[in-house]
Image (tube, rainbow, N blue to C red):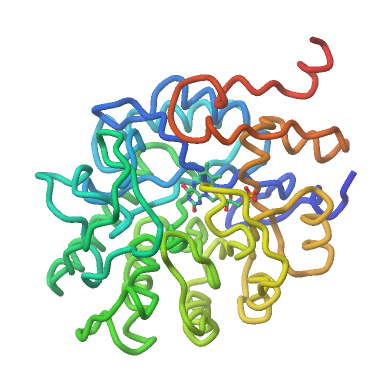
Amino acid sequence: MLPALFSPLKLGPFELAHRVVLAPLTRMRAEPGTLAPHVLNAEYYAQRATPGGLLIAEASPVLPTGFGNPNVPGIYSGAQVAGWKRVTDAVHAKGGIIFLQLWHVGRVSHSSYQPGGALPLAPSAVAIGGDLKTMTADGKVASYETPRALVTEEIPEIVTAYRRAAHNAVAAGFDGVEIHGANGYLIEQFLQSHTNQRTDRYGGSIEHRTRFLLEVTQAVVDVWGADRVGVRLSPYGIANGSGEPDPMPLYTRAVEALNSFKLAYLHLLEPRSSGAGRADVDWRNVPSAMVLFRPIWNGVLMAAGGFVGDTANAAIADGYADVVAFGRYFISNPDLPRRLAHGFPLTPYHRPTFYGGAEKGYTDYPAYDEMAEA
Ligand SMILES: Cc1cc2nc3c(=O)[nH]c(=O)nc-3n(C[C@H](O)[C@H](O)[C@H](O)COP(=O)(O)O)c2cc1C
């Protein structure tokens, strides 16, 4: 037993029974066409639900322009709301709590995913460079395109789309939402200086670059109330071509401004696992986000990135985090809280089945008890 990880915690209006959270995980298994969750997705989330345990459902675009991958579930249409309702019903039937992560990828897209084949949208016309490649909607490896810079008047429309998506998440039966401000996607593109070269009120100074994040947060808080809203950030991350030259001033300002909302939690991704969806990276000599920002953040702090039971327990016991989200090991261990509680061995994850496909690598990982019986 890892006592810190298995002590209860008040998070917003919820009494978490333990502190092992399912991290948001893109799995690309929504229904093609409608991009709505379906029976298989409900089964996957229900397998990972525990009484009083928190799940964060995968990043879900708030607009058709928000996609950069195939078969990702959306949260802007009636069919998607109905699909998600199946998921939330299945999780609630097991006593679980489920938040939805709201997403717009911005420049991390390709025209093949965009309505009318248009260029992806971003704060500025700066492409993801280097060796990074993307996969087009018809499965070809391609370089990233130079996105189209949003005109100022379009930005409040995107904020409104987050607001609509937040309403949709209410209709879909979620318990709350998490705003995806991490990993190089649209919100982070606004935050960081190399991707935001705007000269209007959304760019330039740190104050201006944090405006989009704060407007989105306000819109979502208007719908849900602050105590059912979390925000995910990845200071020092490098996913999807991101990276701020000097992250501390920017993220200090962002976290301080978020403090005033009194959110359910702040979710910080450790930079050592930045881009964990693409490869297993684990650098030892990088700063720890939770250590840096714990003194600045006044509320519940959720840490994620490269944790196992012992390190998660220590992070909580040492006061750096209140709750820990697990990604890859929750994929391969549907009963992860129970395994950590009892010290049972963990099933290794199978990276080739992370993205896309059907049951294999998704709902066919057995629980420990099933393995023992087999
Ligand atoms: C397959 C896969 C999909 C992911 N999808 C998302 C996502 O939709 N939203 C997000 O914020 N992070 C996403 N991540 C990052 C995870 O939430 C998590 O932060 C990361 O895997 C590090 O945690 P871990 O070491 O416990 O796996 C993804 C990671 C993986 C491996």
Query: Which residue lies at the image location 69% right of the left edge and 21% below the top edge?
Result: 366
- Where is residue 294 shown, x and y percent of the image? 67, 75
The residue closer to the viewer here, 210 or 105, is 105
- Where is residue 373 shown, x and y percent of the image? 82, 11
Image: 195 above or below 204 = above
The residue closer to the viewer here, 134 or 124, is 134
Query: Which residue lies at the image location 39% right of the left edge and 76% below the top edge?
Result: 192
Image: 200 above or below 143 = below
Query: Which residue lies at the image location 20% right of the left edge and 68% below the top edge?
Result: 155
Residue most extreme to the left: 116
Q: How many marks?
A: 0
- Where is residue 37 shown, x and y percent of the image? 38, 29
- Where is residue 131 shown, x and y percent of the image? 40, 58
- Quarter of the image that includes the N terminus: top right
Query: Which residue lies at the image location 68% right of the left edge and 40% below the top edge?
Result: 329
* Left/right of residue 99 with respect to residue 30 in the rendered view: right
- Quarter of the image that includes the C terminus: top right
Image: 166 above or below 80 = below
Residue most extreme to the top: 374
* Left/right of residue 270 with respect to residue 123 in the rendered view: right
